[in-house]
Image: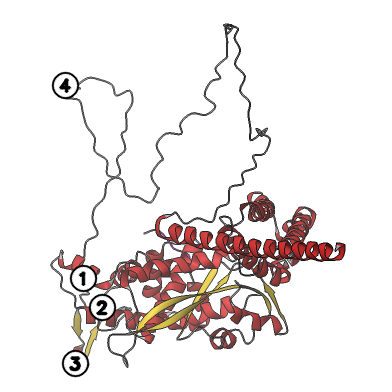
């Protein structure tokens, strides 16, 4: 009888254990479904951000969750509080002065009363910034012809080289069209409407022809930029989609890709158009590359980790995003990881704010950053032991732990960045542009666009005015020595104010 009771007691304990485990599984599933619903609502209605704000405030005392209020029956005592107000620490800097290269129009205003016999003791100057819309103008090259004596022939002045021989477009007009399309994201059909307001009718086919001929003219310079970027020992790589009209499929577009290569050491960016997202494109372009290659977690890049001479560097920002997405699912654990990542980034920010050299930056990382990286690794390993693999937290932990070695490789050299954000910033102009012009007209058109995105992206990195740069290049490149073309790259060309 006693044995039967013991058996039934054991069975009950086992059933309780099984039911408890099943209950935990169902709780996790409910938690996961609630998280997915919250994410859908956030995608539809919420703000998109990556910034993590910790709920732990430094140097501030925290309050307990339960506060017991006490009511005193004694009347409150009146106290006189005095304070000293400090003066303003800084004065308003006033209006910013205008750049020196802006033309100044001076208008002298005299008093309405007679100033005869009075001495001017000073001036009061009021500044105003105004704007005159850009105007088209025609340039006529007039070349006088002279007859040589005795019927020996005719002489005439030599016509200067122009971007498009026998074309009507000058360097300034071509530069403006290209900058408005690829920098200001203004499609050609909208530019045509602007020309119409000036009573100038330019067919779309004519402008397309100008863009093609301009691209052909500066292709050798694009090849020089390619050599410069790919010749560096440190590259950041990312890819972004672009829709391209497919002539074989009427009314449909092909999904092409821009592979973007950023060279942080040269402040240069290179766009390469490919019809697919496979490994073939970057593998061909990087077949002779040796050095550090920094990418996100896209599986195609894993192939490069097996190539000799290449050190794969990961992107901490991508890992951070996974934990940011897991905040709504498991705020406590995801918050701990994000707080630790935030401390690692604080070390990087210190190096940047103090303009440290690569050697100083590496020393700072080893001294202050490495202990934080080790703590972060231990935290991730600890949480992964109990994480559900397909949950948001489990996915974040799996992504990070699987790539932990390459995520930590930025510690090898002070010239390396902790994340891939610079190349992502270089991609943004294309992302903005395709919202306006929607697609490229052909694969060749997409290749030409890649060329202009490369040049204008490099201009942006070097704080160079893209219009002034392209105008200058188009004026001089027809007669420029082929062995000195690198002098015309945005980071090398000296622009003089006219």
Between 212 and 439, the one nearer to me in the picture:
439
Residue of label 4: 113
Q: Label 3: few (<14), some or many (≥20) within 10 Å?
A: few
Question: Which circle's residue, 2 or 1, is located before the other in the chain?
Answer: 1
**In front: label 4 or label 2:** 2
Q: Earlier in the sequence, mark 4 or mark 2?
A: 4
The residues tagged by marks 4 and 2 sit, at their Cα atoms, a distance apart of 58 Å
Which is closer to the viewer, label 3 or label 2? 2
Q: Earlier in the sequence, mark 4 or mark 1?
A: 4
**Residue 484 seen in the figure:** no
Check disc 1 and report the residue beneath it: 192
Q: Secondary structure at mark 2?
A: helix
Q: Earlier in the sequence, mark 1 or mark 3?
A: 3
Question: Can the viewer see residue 300 in this picture?
Answer: yes
Of the two numbered discs 4 and 3 on the same chain, state the one appearing first in sequence. Answer: 4
Which of the two labelled residues, at mark 3 and mark 2, occupies the earlier sequence position? 3
Q: What residue range appears in magenta?
A: 492-497
Query: Residue reaching furthest left?
Result: 199
Q: Nearer the viewer, mark 1 or mark 3?
A: 1
- 399 to the left or right of 367: left
> Residue shown at 41%/65% (left/top)?
466
Q: Position of residue 164 (x, y in %)?
A: 30, 81
Residue 239 is marked as none
Which residue in the structure is indicated by mark 2?
207
Q: Are marks 2 and 1 in contact (CB under 8 Å)?
A: yes
Please state which of the two labelled residues, at mark 4 or mark 1, is closer to the viewer.
1
Does residue 331 lie above or below 30 as drawn? above
Q: Which type of secondary structure does the marked residue at label 1 adopt?
A: helix
Q: CA distance from mark 4 to mark 3?
A: 73 Å
Residue 496 located within the stretch drawn in magenta: yes
> What's the magenta bit mostly, secondary-structure-wise?
loop
**Residue 348 located left or right of residue 128:** right
């Amino acid at each position: 009888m006693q044995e039967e009771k013991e058996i039934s007691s054991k069975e009950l304990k086992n059933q309780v254990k099984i039911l408890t485990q099943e209950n935990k599984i169902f709780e996790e599933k409910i938690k996961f479904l609630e998280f997915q619903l919250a994410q859908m609502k956030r995608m539809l209605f919420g703000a998109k951000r990556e910034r993590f704000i910790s709920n732990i405030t430094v140097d501030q005392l925290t309050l307990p969750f339960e506060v017991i209020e006490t009511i005193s029956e004694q009347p409150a005592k009146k106290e006189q509080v005095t304070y000293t107000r400090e003066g303003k620490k800084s004065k308003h800097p006033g209006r910013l002065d205008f750049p020196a290269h802006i033309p100044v129009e001076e208008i002298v205003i005299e008093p309405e009363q007679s100033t005869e016999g009075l001495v001017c003791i000073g001036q009061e100057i009021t500044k105003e910034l105004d704007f005159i819309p850009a105007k088209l103008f025609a340039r006529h090259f007039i070349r006088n012809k002279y007859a040589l004596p005795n019927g020996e022939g005719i002489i005439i002045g030599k016509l200067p080289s122009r971007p498009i021989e026998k074309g009507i477009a000058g360097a300034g007009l071509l530069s403006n069209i290209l900058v408005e399309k690829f920098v200001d994201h203004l499609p050609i059909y909208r530019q045509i409407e602007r020309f119409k307001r000036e009573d100038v009718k330019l067919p779309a086919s004519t402008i397309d022809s100008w863009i093609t001929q301009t691209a052909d003219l500066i292709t050798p310079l694009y090849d020089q930029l390619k050599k410069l970027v790919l010749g560096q020992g440190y590259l950041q790589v990312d890819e972004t989609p672009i829709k391209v009209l497919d002539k074989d499929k009427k009314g449909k577009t092909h999904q092409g890709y821009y592979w973007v290569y950023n060279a942080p050491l040269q402040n240069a960016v290179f766009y390469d158009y490919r019809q697919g997202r496979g490994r073939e494109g970057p593998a061909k372009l990087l077949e002779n590359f040796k050095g550090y290659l920094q990418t996100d977690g896209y599986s195609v890049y894993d192939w490069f980790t097996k190539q000799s001479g290449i050190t794969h560097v990961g992107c901490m920002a991508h890992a951070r995003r996974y934990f940011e997405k897991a905040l709504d699912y498991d705020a406590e654990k995801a918050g701990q990881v994000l707080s630790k990542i935030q401390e690692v980034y604080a070390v990087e920010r210190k190096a940047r704010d103090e303009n440290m050299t690569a050697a100083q930056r590496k020393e700072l990382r080893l001294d202050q950053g490495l202990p934080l990286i080790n703590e972060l690794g231990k935290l991730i390993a600890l949480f992964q032991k109990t994480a559900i693999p397909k949950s948001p937290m489990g996915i974040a932990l799996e992504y990070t732990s699987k790539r932990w070695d390459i995520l930590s490789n930025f510690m090898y050299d002070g010239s390396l960045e902790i994340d891939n954000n610079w190349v992502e910033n270089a991609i943004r102009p294309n992302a903005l542009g395709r919202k306006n012009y929607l697609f490229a007209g052909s694969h060749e058109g997409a290749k030409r666009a890649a060329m202009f995105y490369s040049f204008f992206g490099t201009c942006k990195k070097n704080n160079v005015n893209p219009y002034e740069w392209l105008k200058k290049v188009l004026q001089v490149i027809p007669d420029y020595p082929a062995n000195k073309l690198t002098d015309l790259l945005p980071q090398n060309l000296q622009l003089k104010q006219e």
